[in-house]
Amino acid sequence: MSAETPAIEVRDLVKTYSGHTAVSKISFSVARGEILGFLGPNGAGKSTTMRILTGYLPATAGEVNVCGVPVAARGDEVKKLIGYMPENNPLPEDMRVAEYLHYRGRLKEISRRKLGPRIDEVLELCDLTRVRHRIIGKLSKGFRQRVGIADAILAEPPVIIMDEPTIGLDPHQILIVRDLIASLRGRMTVIISSHILPEIEMTCDRVLIINQGRVVAAGTPADLRREVFGQARYELVVAGELITALPKALSDVDATLQIAESGAPDAAGFCTLMLTSTRDEDLGEAVLRALATDMRFRVRSLSRIQPTLEDVFLAATRRGWEKVDTAAALPTKTQKSTP
Amino acid sequence: MKHFTTLLSHEIRMLLVSPSTYIAAVLFLTVMGFIFSGVLESYSASAQETSPAAVFFQLFWLPVFFMVPLLTMKCLAEERRLGTLETLLTSPVSTTEVVLGKYFAAYFLYLLLWASTGGFFYILHRFAGDARFLDSGPLVGGYLFIAVSGLLYVALGVFASSLSRNQAVAGILAFTLLFAIIIGVRFVSTVEVLNLESMHPLRAAIDYSLVFRHLEDFTRGVVDTRQILFYLSGTVLALIFSILGVEAKLLHS
């Protein structure tokens, strides 16, 4: 288990349930200390993949290694390397929080001597100290969720897998959970799945988009934007000699700058135009300077449109899996840009 | 097996805080109390040949039918329904440890409840002051039979619980299995066809597994290793099937 082996390595993973393929030839790997986000619509195979990673479900085909340990052959060792929080965070209803963590700690082979201080530490970290003697069944959803996270990080495993950790939480609680996950960065490898895209974008170093059991896109959020859209987009609100002079003026600024679409002029004669450019750097200043000094145009606003991860997600899941090479799912930052 | 004690103490603790345990205990002690006082009444009316303990244990099956399902129906079915089985099995414990922990916790409680009926005999001893009522032979034999046969009954309950995620279904299934092994076998043994010469091996097998005959032998002070082997092998088989039941359900979850 040298430091070079990736925390998680998945090759050609296949899982079929009685003829229905849930996961189809997924390959990816996660570096140590990285936070990976799993995105995908319902039934995409996120939970199944996570369960296979933990050794809870056996895979139909393929290979999964956690810290260099094969899950299929040495499942018992893998269970010691993973802290897992399942979907919907199941907890026993009639135990107290500290009691539950003590029980879990004993199961995870933490020595009695270390367990007490560690529970205190985890309770503090998850902001659960106030409710440590409350019965879990009577806690609110936010607290329960944090009890699940506390359980996952209790034994300080090198890999933490959480299935939808922020589902059903209010914005304040989401913030707490997000900070908690961010605080694990560098120390532990974290895989989280979520529907909430800004969530993933803020916490994760890398995103894996899965649809119908296949990886449809992988990379950092910025990479994904570039990969899926391939060009920078600007929104310009301008009045003046638009049809005759504007295209020329724009191509003077940058040859690749084009008007993609234009709206109808409003009462004051201003039109909203969509500009596209294949240039990556921001052309905003150059465009503004050129148009402001030109007496034929009156500019009201110019802004660069940042495609959100939501756009990426929708585009990627719509695009399907055909175009994506499985090689795109490697952890290196060099991404293939789709033509 | 290093997590076995952790799991066992956790399970016993959870059983002791669960209402169904107390319902089972109250029902059990009420029924047993009625049976016991009924036995005493018949003894006060006329002299009997056997000791009160022997008659008392003759009716052991009545509480077993509702107590064992109540104690065991929850153990695996509830874990699966809540999904806590997933957190349990993704921590470094094996299915075998989980099933054995739950089994021995339920068995411990089963013994505890039966042991509490010892109080009846104590009261009898205290107030009757007659040594004839307290023949220690049938008493010890009866309790030994309860302990040995309980191994199998609780194992069957755990097995029923491993098959369903619904407690009620698990409970009814456990009841059915217990009914089949205690009353069913006795019923089958009375079927005429078995008296035919060609049916002899079947007849022998049924005679071997007649629970009431085992009880009779035990209360007479005959501890037959074949009978103990019957319960032990049945227990091991039921537990292996429970473990397989849990794992098979994972494969098809």
Image (cartoon, coloured by chain):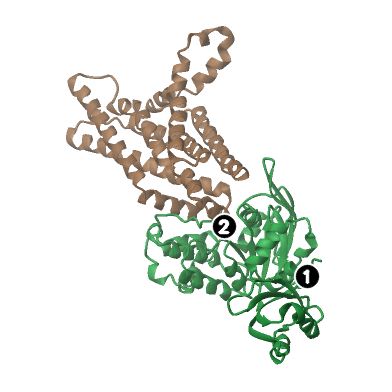
Residue A223, how many percent across, how many down? 72, 72
Question: Which chain identifier belongs to the green chain?
Answer: A
Q: Is residue A169 above or below residue B212?
A: below
Q: Residues within 10 Å of mark 1 (few under 14, many from 20)?
A: some
Q: Is residue B218 above or below residue B111?
A: above
The kind of residue tagged 1 is Gln
Residue B77, how many percent across, how many down? 48, 43
Question: Which element carries disc 1, helix, strand or loop?
Answer: loop
Question: Which chain identifier belongs to the brown chain?
Answer: B
Image quadrant containing the C terminus of chain B = top right
Residue B192, how many percent across, how many down? 48, 8
> Which chain hosts label 2?
B
The kind of residue tagged 2 is Ser
Q: Would you name the residue on which mark 1 appears?
A: A335
Q: Would you name the residue on which mark 2 appears?
A: B91
Please tell me whether mark 1 or mark 2 is closer to you in this view.
Answer: 1
Give the residue displayed 17% in from the left and 35% down from the top.
Answer: B127
Q: Is residue B36 visible?
A: yes
Observer-nearest of A303 and A173: A303
Quadrant housing residue A251:
bottom right
